[in-house]
Amino acid sequence: MSETPLDKPDPFDFLGIDSLLDAEEILLRDTVRQYVEKEIKPHVGDWWDEGVIPHKDLARAFGELGMLGMHLEGYGCAGTSATAYGLACVELEAGDSGIRSFVSVQGSLAMFPIWKFGSEEQKQTWLPPMAKGEVIGCFGLTEPDSGSDPSSMRTNARRDGSDWVINGSKMWITNGSIADVAIIWARTDEGVRGFIVPTDTPGFTAHDIKKKASLRASVTSELALDEVRVPDDFVLPNVASMRGPLSCLNEARFGIAFGVMGSARDCYETALRYSQERVQFGQPIAAFQLTQKKLVEMMVAVQRGTLLALHLGRRKDQGELTSQQVSFGKFDNVRQALDVARVARSILGGNGITLEYPVFRHMANLETVFTYEGTNEIHTLVMGQAITGLDAFS
Ligand SMILES: Cc1cc2nc3c(=O)[nH]c(=O)nc-3n(C[C@H](O)[C@H](O)[C@H](O)COP(=O)(O)OP(=O)(O)OC[C@H]3O[C@@H](n4cnc5c(N)ncnc54)[C@H](O)[C@@H]3O)c2cc1C
């Protein structure tokens, strides 16, 4: 808790948002924050530069911290509130969006569909090792010709005796080549179904997408499925429509609405400290009116976005959060975070373009976050449809 006197707001928690969190939430938030400060921030600039991520070590560490599938109940998962999960996302993304993506994909996109739509046997088999970080998952929905409109997917599965045979390709799949298991969404005669595909199944191959200028501390892959054969009990039994993948995306987008406020906060705090130390024209640059305007705009955006995320978290915990409200959070918080990163970059001057500071890395990462999990435009249309009753998607 802040020890700042009442007449002087804390520059790092101007509105006193900490007072809206309970002791358990603050403990969890601080635990993740300490882990990120010690184990992620000192190294992530190099990982980003080299385009690598120590996924095995991170998976084990996140498993020990109880962060994989943390908001799911049972099967070795921590069973925290949705708000607590969101607060963890903030801290992870203050480290790097790629690190938060690693945890989001595992929990919200790979474990959640098994937890929500899987059989009891599938849950018992997969969730405990995934919660421990012993098994890494990925989520295959997007295809080369099917991005914002995933219902146009071509990947298909057909029944063959007691097996299913899957053919197709998936694009932009986070953790694709390092995953032990892939949740593959495919068109079938019965509707869109989710398949649990161990990645060593014959016919399954993954190739990394290289030369990325964003989300570099994260593996992104293209998957090919060529006559991939899985038994009938590898299909998720309890969904056969786009509701399956879309409900997973809703979970992940919720985490993003929180998470990006971590990147934005890190950019604001870096810029504030830098501006107090950097002297030009005989004064710290923080003393100039133009710089103060930038700092205040950043601080306001971070506080406002954090309040928004917290509001969504409380609604989710009360079972009242709609997918359109999640769109609101993803839409506004990501664009605000991008603005904060860009302004912070300008305050750091030339230093702002280096990886010595986290700002440019966050800024580049947020370009991905702007696009994945529903682009900014798609969330605009979701909310446009909600307020007008008219569908403007096509
Ligand atoms: C680093 C990274 C990691 C990712 N990880 C995963 C993952 O793990 N699993 C997975 O399945 N996918 C993943 N994705 C894919 C991501 O979800 C898609 O990139 C996203 O859905 C957009 O699809 P697209 O890139 O094909 O763009 P497109 O759909 O081709 O869109 C291009 C542009 O057209 C706009 N547009 C499209 N339709 C409309 C419309 N009706 N009205 C107005 N504008 C429109 C879009 O908003 C966008 O600006 C990842 C992407 C990236 C970059």
Image (spheres, rainbow, N blue to C red):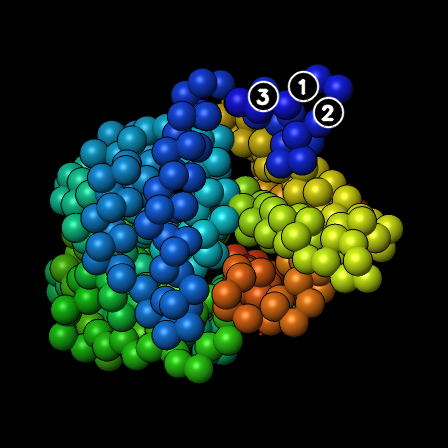
Residue at x-position 18% and y-position 40%: 128
Inter-mark Cα distance, 2 to 3: 10 Å
| Residue type, numbered disc 3 | Glu
Inter-mark Cα distance, 1 to 2: 6 Å
SS class, disc 3: loop
| Residue type, numbered disc 2 | Lys
| Image position, residue 335 (x, y; %) | 67, 55
Residue at x-position 70% and y-position 42%: 299
Query: Which callout, 2 or 3, points at the residue further toward the start of the chain?
Result: 3
| Image position, residue 349 (x, y; %) | 69, 67
Q: Which residue is mark 1?
A: 5
Q: Quadrant of ligand 1?
A: bottom right
Neighbor class of circle 2 (other Cα within 10 Å; few <14, some 14-19, many 20+) is: few
Q: Nearer the viewer, residue 170 or 41?
A: 41
Q: Quadrant of the C terminus?
A: bottom right
Residue 77 shows in the view: yes
| Image position, residue 331 (x, y; %) | 65, 51
Residue at x-position 41% and y-position 21%: 24
SS class, disc 2: loop
Residue 275 against residue 207 in the figure, above or below:
above
Q: Which residue is mark 3?
A: 3
Q: Nearer the viewer, residue 95 or 42?
A: 42
Residue at x-position 44% and y-position 32%: 29
